[in-house]
Amino acid sequence: MYFMKSFTLTAIVLLSLTAAFGQWIKQTVNTNASFRGLSIVNDKVIWASGTGGTVIRTIDGGKTWNVFAVPRAEKLDFRDIEAFDANTAYILSIGNGDASRIYKTIDGGTSWKAQFTNTNEKAFFDAIACWDAKNCIAMSDPVDGHYVFINTTDGETWKPIVSNQMPAAKEGEAAFAASGTCLYINPKNGDVFLVSGGNDARVFKSTDRGKTWTSATTPIVKGTPGSGIFSIAFRNELHGMIAGGNYEKPNDAASTVAFTRDGGKTWQPGEGLSGYRSAVAYIDDKTTIAVGTSGTDVSTDRGATWKKIGSEDLNAVTAKGKNSVWAVGPKGLVFKLAKVSAEAGAVTTPLPYNVVDIILSHIQIRSECPGTEKTCSPDRIVKVAVVAPEIDGDQARYNYIISGGRIVGTGANVVWDLTGVFPGTYTITAGISNRTSSDAPGRSVMKTITIQ
């Protein structure tokens, strides 16, 4: 597309009130190209790609930058780049028909070889992702109702993935070529993910390098051409996040982030981003960063809470640890994130965690229930699941307040036993607090059940 919980909650994170990530440091790069492709090899080697057939590279951590003009590509927009060292990188340009291309350099950008030129007038390639320097996959928006994938297994030739089996795209559903992160390979296990927007906002997953796929619904905003999921990232095999929103309403923060704890099978809503975000990345196991046209948000507690740290217009962000966090944007903008040291004597304070929702197996108990009414059951044993942002460790206490019956179990998933309770309306309230602190829990949620 041309752009362009129930979580396992097991601890409370201690966050310094005075230690935080600081401001973006602007780099001096001799170009006005708009950048969306970004790839970090290590602390020293960083590549980016953009409009006007432009590619840039630093091999000294940003002290100096090389600006490359890919031959005969001055009209192309390179929205994605995958680099492996100071010499080797793939770039992908977007557009209808033969505007979608893949080039590769093996001599640090001195020369570029055109490896793939799209010949399908209906196709529009959005992104490329690689397992290693020889094995990569690229994707196009749906053609005749199905996403199109190609791959290389030798680093030279690209072929269609003929055996692809994928759920059909919905009318008006496509991917966003906004940051090169709509197509993503989990570095921990090699799973491939594709995220969509428009009339739906889904996460597609392949465990066999694009041959077969499954799909999952998400709570991200959808329904307009500019809304949906724009980016996906994982911190391990199971835990990841998606971000997006509506780029036509950059300050609208509703339904812009969600999390998974089961490898992308299910997604739970989060909150706290300050607007639409086109890219998200994990800096380390606990620290996450998201950027968009209205600024940057950082979380140091795995997305439970967020802090806006800047208002720079940014398209893409990537990280290789806290010492190498980079972002790019329009008009030649390239930034490196500087870390602010903690002040002496900083005090750590336990963060309260907010409950997002309580999911009950049913909300009405009657001796006879219509077979089509999923909310009703004659069973007085009600399964309860608390949805909240993920936290780490074993210090979280789940607090349940009920107006009748009893709670069986502990943690995020318990049973509400209403056996023997008289007919009437009863409530359950859930909150989360820190076992080692007397502080009050964060926001709680209350749900009601009726016994007839």
Image (cartoon, rainbow, N blue to C red):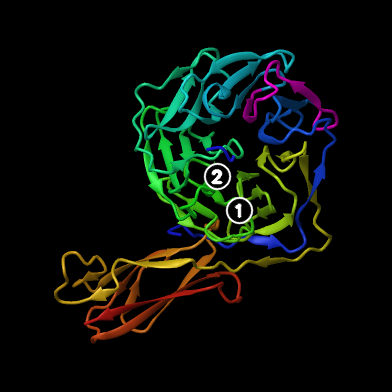
Query: Residue at (43%, 44%) from the top-left corner?
Result: 172
Q: Is residue 27 above or below residue 134?
A: below
Q: Is residue 446 above or below residue 150?
A: below
Mark 1 element type: loop
Residue 2 in the image, given as x and y percentages of width and height: 56, 37
Start and end of the magenta stretch? 60-84
Taking depth in this image into account, of 144 and 205 the one nearest to the observer is 144
Dominant secondary structure (helix, strand or loop) of the stretch shown in magenta = loop
Residue 273 in the image, given as x and y percentages of width and height: 61, 58
Left or right position of 45 against 423: right
Q: Is residue 65 magenta?
A: yes
Type of the residue with mark 2: Phe
Query: Residue at (76%, 21%) from the top-left corner?
Result: 68
Taking depth in this image into account, of 397 and 163 the one nearest to the observer is 163
Residue 428 found in image quarter: bottom left
Alpha carbon distance from label 1 to label 2: 9 Å
* Image quarter of the C terminus: bottom left
Residue 436 found in image quarter: bottom right
Residue 367 in the image, given as x and y percentages of width and height: 15, 76
Residue 341 in the image, given as x and y percentages of width and height: 81, 53
**First reached walking from the N terminus: tag 1 or tag 2:** 2
Q: Is residue 429 magenta?
A: no
Q: Is residue 397 above or below residue 225?
A: below
Question: Local crowd at mark 1 within 10 Å, few (<14), some, or many (≥20)?
Answer: many
Type of the residue with mark 1: Tyr
CB-based contact (under 8 Å), mark 1 and mark 2: yes
Left or right position of 219 against 246: left
Query: What residue sits right under mark 1 in the picture?
Result: 276
Mark 2 element type: strand
Query: What residue sits right under mark 2 in the picture?
Result: 230
Left or right position of 324 against 240: right
